[in-house]
Image (tube, rainbow, N blue to C red):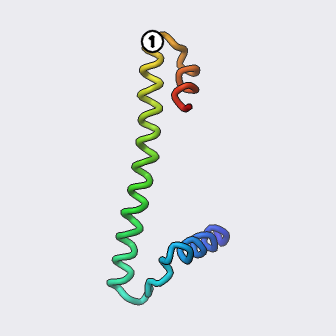
Amino acid sequence: MKDVQAYYQTFQEEMGWDKVDPQDFQSSKEFLLYTHMLLTTEVAEVAEEFRTILYRTKDLTETGMAQNAAFLQAKQ
């Protein structure tokens, strides 16, 4: 866990997000909301990729391709 925290601290510094005063409510609130929006956007992009793979797999299996082969092709 300490490695993850250290990595996150370094990432914050590289992104310029280490300027937040943890004792200031408004600053902390804005930072948390901004971080939440960024995280939500990234998760949505990953979910979209998964959805695309699953739909493509379904389409390929409906053409007669074996499910595992369809899945491998859909991931490319």
Q: Secondary structure at mark 1?
A: loop
Residue 42 drawn above or below residue 9:
above
Residue 39 drawn above or below residue 72:
below
Q: Residue at the spot x=67%, y=69% of the render?
A: 3
* Quadrant for the C terminus in the image: top right
Q: Residue at the spot x=42%, y=48% of the render?
A: 45
Residue 10 drawn above or below residue 26:
above
Q: Is residue 53 toward the left or the right of residue 72 in the image?
A: left
Pointer 1: what residue? 63
Residue 66: percent from left, percent from top: 55, 15
Q: Is residue 2 toward the left or the right of residue 62 in the image?
A: right
Q: Residue at the spot x=47%, y=84% of the render?
A: 19
Residue 37: percent from left, percent from top: 36, 63
Residue 18: percent from left, percent from top: 50, 81
Q: Is residue 9 toward the left or the right of residue 27 in the image?
A: right
Residue 12: percent from left, percent from top: 53, 74
Q: Nearer the viewer, residue 22 or 53?
A: 53
Residue 46 drawn above or below residue 22:
above
